[in-house]
Each structure stands twice: as structure tokens, then as C-alpha cells.
Image (tube, coloured by chain):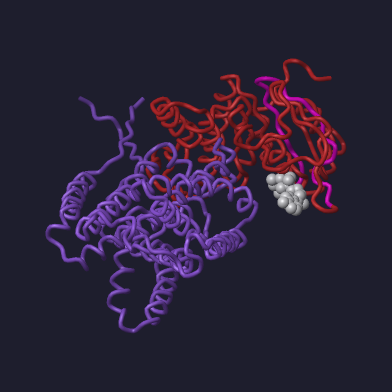
Chain colours: A purple, B red
């Protein structure tokens, strides 16, 4: 009988790894060569990449199309505020804390939310985010409805350093999110995620607990969004309930994932770039950019359901983050 | 009544959908290593019985015992890990995953094998079910027949003690049916108990040594194949639907 072996990576992926390394190195050095505006844009780009990756896990693998992930952006932002106003502690400590608090909250909320399916789940998640917004808007010690500034917590730190730190945190989150998703998808977890995505009934019959997979994805995605929320607070220096818990966050995640290509790692990165380019170039037209975003998302969903990355990957046979297994005959030596 | 050699015992199990009695007070036991065929007309409740044993559907009344353990309240993944593997009559492939990855899911989570061993078992199962030529294809690209092979392959990869096969021979050529019979008999030779729902009688008879006939969810015959096929009620049903 012929022997077979299973292999995973492709040559392109190693090459892409080197390019990615070079790009990340340039980004880390950005405070020394970039303008303030460039640093700011890069920071928000990486934040969007991180949250889009999280929403991609949730919707692209768990089938959990939530429109309430802003709950954790807001929660993470307020964790940063509380750490900052407590004094004593460095505000940078709020990042891991925001992740832990968000995962804990997500775990508690899951008991309620996971009773709902499909559209009810989506709306339920949004209702939870609204409730959180109302709670924080009515907490006077956190600035109430008009929000609170955290500049006082950063008085000892110069502007250049502050912006450099925010950028480096964003790099850690953006690259970390991509790396985490890649590692998860290549591990045995990735098999379970893909199985639940494609057929819950079959996955369950083959020993995969769909409920556990979904809960895992929800906790990871919520922790990730919580940390992005803390980043947003650290980089904007103020937090207000209406913007921290705004459904716009989820709209951005949705847009980046759908335009870029749901269920892929490359897609949300591409989608985040497209989002920022559209936002910058349409900035002067005010609210119109939302309409353009919405229309382009609908067009992509209709014409290219696998997103822009799907189109590119098919045309040029690209696989930057190979997660599939290739079986080939063992070469005789 | 429950022999200690029974791998599966179904005790007074009933299930209804609204006013439709789909499973009607079924009781039977399957021995370790036994191969049993299930026959009955369309809509008799055969697939529902598999859903009840596999855990996708909970019975209204009754109890299901697997290897001495009451599994009535267990979820499907737990039942799979205990050793119940099933194929679906309407295939549910993981369409965005390759054939190999589909099978690997069963070996990794159903059989709980470590990476290297899961790889070995998956390759072996792919080979045995005749899918090696398509091992790297996304399963979305498979024909219906190959999807049925994949159902069998994934179920085998979970290393079941009891294998539930739901109409996997329909549509195969005579040569393919013979290959399938050989595969199933080889699985059986390893001591795996098999329950096979099949309309293709000659394929069934080449494997099983006992047949259960059901109609309107109730058992109408249970015994050696020749006895069951000679049963007047079974003959009436089969003549009635024009099959032989
Ligand atoms: N989820 C459900 N809800 C309502 N009715 C159902 C459901 N599942 C099955 N039924 C009905 O139960 C009856 C038995 O279905 P089942 O699929 O078990 O039959 P079967 O014996 O496998 O038939 P076939 O030979 O066509 O595969 C059918 O009348 C079917 O319509
Ligand atoms: Mg059926």
C-alpha cells in the first residue's frame, strides 16, 4: 500500500511571513518617521483589524451574527476609565483587565443570550449593549451621559510617548488578533470551528460540542473587543457612553469582515483598509459615507459573497495564511 | 430481558411530532458485534430512530442504554465519544473543508485521538472508503455518492463501537455495492456492531444476520432475515409499495 503524508504550509506563506515581519517592524518604528496624523490613522486601522478579526470568529465560524459587540468595546473603555481614575495603577494595566472583565461579562451574558437563535440572538446582543450604555450613562462618578476625560491619568507622559504607546498597543492587538486567529484555526480548534460553521448537526454527531465551540468563540471575541475598547480610551483620552457603546463599532466590524471576506484571516485586514480609505476619501461629505459603506457592503454580499479577498484568492491562487491540510503520496527515497 | 452482552438497549421509546406518532413504543436490544438491518416504507420512522439513538432528537417516553449506561439525557457529541457513530441519509458534509479534514474531525473529536494518531486513522479511513483520489477536494465539490462515502468515512473515523448507517447503498452501481459490502463486513469483523437502514435488500442480506421491520413507528417484525421477509405483514407492506 502506498504511504501518504499530510503537510500544511505553502512557500508563499513563508514569503508572506517575511513581508509581514518587515511591515510590522516599520510600523513599530513609525513614531520616529511618521506624522501624527499617520500614527493616529494606523492606530485606528490596527484597532479595526483586531475587532474585525474578533467579529469574523464570531460570525464567520460560530454563526453568531451579533450586532452587539459594541457592548465589550464600551465595557473595555470604561475599565480603562476606572483604572485611570482610581489612580496609582498605570492605565496601561487596563488592557489585560479589560480583556478579563469582558470575558467574564460575556460568560454571564451568554446564559441569557445563548437561549436565542439567529435574528433574535443578533437583536438580543444589541439590547444588552444598550442596557450597558444606559447603566454607564447614569453613573455620575464616571461622568454620566457626557462622559469623562482621562487626561489626568496621563499627565506625567509626553504627547509623543502617549501616541507611540497607543500605536504600539494597537500593533500588539492587531498583530495579536491575526496571530491568535491563525493559531486557533491551525490547531484542532480550527477543525471544530469549521465543522460547526458548515454543519452543526454533523459536527455534533462527530463529537464536537457546538455549544462549547460557540461559547469559546464568544468569550474570545468579547475579550478581544474589550481590549480594543481600552485602546480606544487610551488613544482618544476620553470616553462617553454614546460613542463607546455605539452600534457603529459593530457596523464597522461587519463592513470590514463582509467586504473583505468572511471566514478568512486576510479578508478582515483587507476590509479594514477599504473601510479607512472610504472613510478618509468621503470625510468631506459627512453622513454620506455611511450610505456608500452600506451600499458597497450590499453589492459585495450580492456579487461576491466571499468578499474581496475571496475574489483575489481565486484569481491569483493566493493563500497567505494556509490552514488547510494537503495529503500527498510519500516520496520514495 | 436485557442481556449483559447487549451494546444498545432501546426500552419503550416513543416520539411524536404534533399528532404524528413517529416512533411508537419501540423496544429491542442489539448485541456487541451484531449486524442488524432496519427496513420499512418511506416515512416509517427509521431515520427518526437513528436520531433518537444518536441524540439529535429526545424521546417523549422511554430509555436508551448504551453499554450499560443510560444515555437518554446525553447530547450527541457525548454519545459519539462513548462510541456511537452515525451517517446521515441526507449527507451533511463540511463543505468548506477538504475530504481529509472532514474525516479528521471525527478522528480528533469523536475518537479523541492525538494529532499523529488521528492523522493515521483518517488516512486509513479515507483509503478504505475509496476517497483517496479526492482527499484534497473541498467536500462541496463531491457528487452525492461521494458525499455518502464521506458520511461513512467520518463515522468510521470516530472509531465507533456501534455504527448507524442510513441508506448509504442507494444509487451505487453493482460493483460499488460489492465494494461497500466488503468495507462494512471488514468493519464488522473488527467487532463493531452495525445497524443499517437500507432499501437495497440484497446488500443488506450480505451483511446482517437479523432484520427489524417497522411501520408507522412501530415494530412489526424482528428476527432472522428469512423469517422477517416471510412475515405476512412485511410482505404486505413491501408488495404495497411495489418494492421487493
Ligand atoms: N422534525 C420533524 N418534524 C415533524 N415531522 C417530522 C420531523 N422529522 C420527521 N418527521 C416525520 O416523521 C415521519 C418519519 O420520518 P423519518 O425520516 O424517520 O422516516 P424514514 O423511515 O427515515 O423515511 P425514509 O425511508 O423516507 O427515509 C415522516 O412522516 C416525517 O415527515
Ligand atoms: Mg430516512
Where residue B155 sits, quadrant-wise, is: top right
Where residue A281 sits, quadrant-wise, is: bottom left
Q: Position of residue A105 (x, y in %)?
A: 53, 49
**Residue placed most toward the observer, B171 or A190:** A190
Q: Position of residue A98 (x, y in %)?
A: 43, 49
Q: Position of residue A325 (x, y in %)?
A: 35, 40
**Residue placed most toward the observer, A61 or A42:** A42
Task: Say which quadrant the N terminus of chain B sits in.
Answer: top right
**Residue placed most toward the observer, A203 or B169:** A203
Q: Is residue B115 visible?
A: yes
Q: Is residue B37 magenta?
A: yes
Query: What residue sits 41% from the left and 27% below the top?
Result: B120
Is B218 left or right of A118, judged from the image as shown? right
Per the rendered image, the range of residues in magenta is B20-41
**Residue placed most toward the observer, A28 or A175:** A28
SS assignment for the magenta stretch, majority: strand
Task: Say which quadrant the C terminus of chain B sits in.
Answer: top right
Q: Position of residue A55 (x, y in %)?
A: 44, 56
Is A177 left or right of B112, judged from the image as shown? left
Is A92 left or right of A55, judged from the image as shown? left
Q: Is residue A10 magenta?
A: no
Query: What residue sits 52% from the left and 28% below the top?
Result: B111
Q: Which quadrant of the frame does ligand 2 lie within?
A: top right
Considering every residue shown, the one lying at the far top of the view is: B4
Q: Is residue B242 visible?
A: no
Amino acid at each position: 500500500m502506498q504511504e501518504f503524508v499530510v503537510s500544511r504550509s505553502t512557500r508563499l506563506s513563508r514569503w508572506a511571513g517575511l513581508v509581514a515581519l518587515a511591515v510590522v517592524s516599520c510600523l513599530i518604528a513609525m513614531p520616529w518617521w511618521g506624522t501624527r496624523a499617520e500614527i493616529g490613522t494606523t492606530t485606528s486601522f490596527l484597532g479595526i483589524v483586531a475587532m474585525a478579526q474578533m467579529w469574523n470568529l464570531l460570525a464567520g465560524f460560530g454563526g453568531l451574527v451579533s450586532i452587539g459587540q459594541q457592548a465589550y468595546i464600551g465595557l473595555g473603555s470604561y475599565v480603562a476609565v476606572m483604572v485611570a481614575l482610581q489612580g496609582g495603577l498605570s492605565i496601561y494595566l487596563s488592557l489585560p483587565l479589560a480583556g478579563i472583565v469582558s470575558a467574564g461579562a460575556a460568560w454571564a451574558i451568554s446564559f441569557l443570550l445563548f437561549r436565542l437563535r439567529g435574528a433574535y440572538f443578533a437583536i438580543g446582543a444589541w439590547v444588552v449593549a444598550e442596557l450597558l450604555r444606559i447603566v454607564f450613562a447614569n453613573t455620575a462618578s464616571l461622568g454620566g451621559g457626557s462622559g469623562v476625560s482621562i487626561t489626568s491619568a496621563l499627565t506625567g507622559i509626553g504627547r509623543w510617548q502617549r501616541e507611540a504607546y497607543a500605536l504600539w498597543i494597537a500593533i500588539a492587538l492587531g498583530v495579536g488578533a491575526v496571530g491568535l486567529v491563525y493559531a486557533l484555526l491551525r490547531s484542532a480548534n480550527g477543525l471544530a470551528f469549521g465543522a460547526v460553521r458548515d454543519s452543526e448537526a454533523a459536527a455534533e454527531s462527530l463529537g464536537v460540542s457546538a455549544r462549547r465551540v460557540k461559547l469559546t468563540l464568544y468569550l474570545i471575541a468579547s475579550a478581544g473587543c474589550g481590549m480594543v475598547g481600552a485602546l480606544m480610551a487610551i488613544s482618544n483620552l476620553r470616553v462617553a457612553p454614546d460613542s463607546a457603546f455605539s452600534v457603529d463599532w459593530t457596523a464597522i466590524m461587519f463592513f470590514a469582515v463582509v467586504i473583505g471576506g468572511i471566514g478568512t484571516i486576510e479578508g478582515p485586514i483587507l476590509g479594514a483598509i477599504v473601510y479607512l480609505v472610504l472613510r478618509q476619501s468621503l470625510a468631506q461629505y459627512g453622513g454620506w459615507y455611511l450610505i456608500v459603506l452600506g451600499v458597497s457592503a450590499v453589492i459585495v454580499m450580492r456579487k461576491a459573497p466571499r468578499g474581496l479577498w475571496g475574489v483575489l484568492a481565486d484569481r491569483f491562487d493566493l493563500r497567505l495564511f494556509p490552514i488547510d491540510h494537503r495529503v500527498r503520496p510519500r516520496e520514495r527515497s | 430481558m436485557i442481556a449483559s452482552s447487549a451494546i444498545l438497549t432501546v426500552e419503550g421509546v416513543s416520539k411524536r411530532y404534533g399528532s404524528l406518532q413517529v416512533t411508537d413504543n419501540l423496544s429491542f436490544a442489539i448485541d456487541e458485534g451484531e449486524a442488524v438491518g432496519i427496513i420499512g416504507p418511506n416515512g416509517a420512522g427509521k431515520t427518526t430512530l437513528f436520531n433518537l439513538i444518536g441524540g439529535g432528537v429526545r424521546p417523549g417516553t422511554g430509555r436508551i442504554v448504551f453499554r450499560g449506561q443510560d444515555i437518554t439525557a446525553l447530547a450527541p457529541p457525548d454519545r459519539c465519544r462513548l462510541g456511537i457513530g452515525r451517517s446521515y441519509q441526507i449527507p451533511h458534509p463540511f463543505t468548506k473543508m477538504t475530504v481529509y479534514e472532514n474525516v479528521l474531525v471525527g478522528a480528533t473529536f469523536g475518537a479523541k485521538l492525538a494529532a499523529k494518531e488521528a492523522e493515521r486513522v483518517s488516512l486509513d479511513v479515507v483509503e478504505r472508503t475509496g476517497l483517496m483520489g479526492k482527499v484534497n477536494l473541498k467536500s462541496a465539490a463531491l457528487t452525492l455518492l461521494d458525499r455518502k462515502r464521506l458520511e461513512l468515512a467520518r463515522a468510521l473515523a470516530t472509531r465507533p463501537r456501534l455504527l448507524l448507517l442510513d441508506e448509504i447503498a442507494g444509487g451505487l452501481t453493482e460493483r460499488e455495492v460489492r465494494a461497500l459490502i466488503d468495507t462494512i463486513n471488514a468493519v464488522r469483523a473488527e467487532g463493531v456492531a452495525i445497524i443499517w437502514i437500507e432499501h437495497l435488500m440484497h446488500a443488506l442480506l450480505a451483511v446482517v444476520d437479523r432484520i427489524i421491520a417497522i411501520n408507522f413507528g412501530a415494530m412489526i417484525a424482528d428476527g432472522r432475515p428469512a423469517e422477517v421477509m416471510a412475515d405476512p405483514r412485511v410482505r404486505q407492506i413491501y408488495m404495497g409499495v411495489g418494492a421487493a
